Image (cartoon, grey):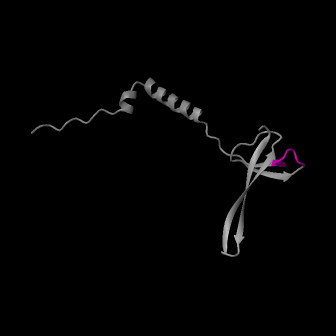
Amino acid sequence: MQKSILVAVDRIVKIPKYNREVRRTTKLMAHDETDTCNIGDTVRIHSCRPRSKRKCWEVTDVLQRTKIYDAEAATRGAVNKLRAVADQGFAASALHPPPPSPPPCA
């Protein structure tokens, strides 16, 4: 869905019978007009007119952005590092050291 995000709102509820606190989560659909939110971002939402059956909230602010892990970029970086080591001419010795020599016979 474009311009829609699913927001999880956590709250702590006290259960008087057991004298315990329990974490409850409510999932809300929110409208993101700029479509800039990513998974893991912390956002501020406000109620608005119903935009669909489940969506009656809208994102007003992105409070904190999440760092996005790019697997392809990490792989490219590792490959480039190995190529640089290979270009220097000692890739075989750097990656696989020679086996230890056997002890001399007495």
Residue 42 lies, with reference to residue 68, above or below; the image says below
Residue at far right of view: 49
Which segment did they paint magenta? 49-60
Report the quarter where the C terminus lies.
top left
Left or right: where does residue 23 sit relative to residue 77?
right
Q: Quadrant of residue 76?
A: top right
Residue at far front of view: 53
Q: Which of these two is toward me, 30 or 38?
A: 30
Give the percent coordinates (x, y) of residue 68. Answer: 65, 41
Residue 61 within the magenta-colored segment of the rendering: no
Query: How many labels, in total?
Result: 0
Residue in view at x 68 percent, y 46 percent = 66
Q: Which of these two is toward me, 96 or 55?
A: 55
Left or right: where does residue 96 sit relative to residue 58?
left
Residue 74 lies, with reference to residue 60, above or below; the image says above
Give the percent coordinates (x, y) of residue 67. Answer: 65, 44
Give the percent coordinates (x, y) of residue 46. Answer: 84, 52
Residue in view at x 68 percent, y 47 percent = 40
Residue in view at x 56 percent, y 35 percent = 74
Q: Quadrant of residue 92?
A: top left
Residue 53 within the magenta-colored segment of the rendering: yes
Residue in view at x 78 percent, y 39 percent = 35
Left or right: where does residue 21 sit relative to residue 58?
left
Give the percent coordinates (x, y) of residue 34. Answer: 81, 39
Report the quarter where the N terminus lies.
top right
Residue at far left of view: 106
